Image (cartoon, rainbow, N blue to C red):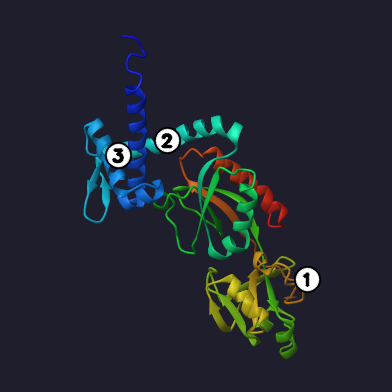
Amino acid sequence: MMWNDFPQSVPDITMDLIDGLRAFVATAESGSFTGAAERLDMSNRLTSKYVAELEARLGVRLLQRTTRQVGLTPSGETLLARAPALLDDLDAMLAEVTDDRQGLSGTLRISAPVTLGEKYVQGMLSRFAAPHPRLTIDLRLSDAFVDLAAEGIDLAFRVGDVAISSMTRRKLGAIRSRLVASPDYLARHPAPQAPEDLQDHACIVDTNRAAPAHWRLTRDGESVSVQVPTRFMVNSAQVARDLAVAGDGIAFCPDFVLGDDLEARRLVHLLPDHDAPAHPLSALWLEGRTLPRKTRALIDFAVEDIRSSGMG
C-alpha cells in the first residue's frame, strides 16, 4: 500500500486528535465544559463531543462528570501532565512558520489589575498590537485573584511581591507612589513638613494596598511608617486621585494614575524629600508551559515600553 492510498483519513485523524486534546485541556483547566467552550470559542455540545471522541479513541475515561463540574480520572491526570506542553509546542511551531510572513496572529488573553489596566496596560497593548492586524487582544481587568489556568490567561501583569509556586515571574519595572493634595486643600490646611504631620490631615486610603492606612516613607536610608487618619477608604487608586483633585484630602497615589497632574498643578507633591518604597511590576505565566512566540514578543515589548515610560 502506497503512503497516499488514504490521503484524507490520516489528516482527519490527526486533526480530530488535536481538537480532542485542546477540548480536554481546556475542560480540565477550567473545570467545566462551559468554561472550556468559552475559551475555545465553540459550543458546549461540540466541546463535550470532542472530549468524548478522544476518550473513545484512547479507550479510557479522562474526566469524571457531575452536574456542576468535571474532575480528572488517573488517566486524565497523566494526560494533563503532558498535553498542554505538547499543544504549546505545536502552536509555537505553527506560529513561527506563519508569523515570519504575516506577523503575529491568534489571541492573547491578558489579565491586569483594574486601574493599572485602564491607565497603562491598555495603551501599551495598543502600541504592541498596532503592527499585527491578525492578532486579537483579550484584556481582562480584575483586582481579584485570577486562576490563570481556569481562565485561560496567557499572561498576567501584577504589582507587588508575587510568589506562587505554579507561576513563572519576570520583573518588568517598578511602581512608585507619591503623597499628593490639591492646591485648594493646601489653602485650607498647612502642608505637612514631616511624615508625622500626616496624622493631623484628612487622608484618602486605597484599600488595595497591603497595609492601607500605614504609609511608609524613607529619607536618607531611614524609614518611617505612619498610621494615618482615614477620611475616605476606596479600593481604587484612580478614585483616590480624583478625591485628592477635588480637595478632599491627601492621597498616596502610584505615579501611573497621576499623569500630568503635577505639571498642570491639579495636585502638589508633598514631602518631596521622602521616597516611597517601590513595588515590582511583573509579568506572570503558568510554570512549565512553553511560551508562544506572541507571548514572548509581548513580554519583550513590555520591558522596553515600561522602561521608556519611566517605570523601568
Q: Which residue is mark 2?
A: 87
Q: Which mark sits nearer the N-terminus, 1 or 3?
A: 3
Q: Note whether 92 is above or below 305 in the view shown.
A: above
Q: Quadrant of the N terminus?
A: top left
Secondary structure state at the residue bearing disc 1: loop
Q: Which mark is residue 124?
A: none
- Disc 3 residue type (three-letter): Tyr
Identity, as a three-letter code, of the amino acid under mark 2? Leu
Q: Circle 3 — which element? A: helix
> Which quarter of the rendering shows the C terminus?
bottom right
In the rendered image of this protein, does residue 162 appear above or below residue 73?
below
Q: Mark 1 highlights which residue?
A: 263
- Circles 1 and 3, Cβ within 8 Å, touching? The answer is no
Can you see residue 302? no
Q: Earlier in the sequence, mark 2 or mark 3?
A: 3
Query: Tags 2 and 3 in contact by the CB under 8 Å rule?
Result: no
**Residue at image point 67% right, 71% down:** 217
Q: Position of residue 290 (x, y in %)?
A: 49, 38
C-alpha span from label 1 to label 3: 58 Å
> Is residue 210 in view from this perspective?
yes
Judge the density around disc 3: few (<14), some (14-19), many (≥20) Cα neighbours within 10 Å: many
Which residue is disc 3 drawn over? 50
Can you give x and y, in whole percent of width and height, for residue 67 in the image?
21, 55
Q: Is residue 204 above or below residue 293?
A: below
Identify which residue is drawn at 34% across, 39% down.
80
Q: Nearer the viewer, residue 8 or 210?
A: 8
Whole-percent x, y for residue 30 in the image? 36, 50
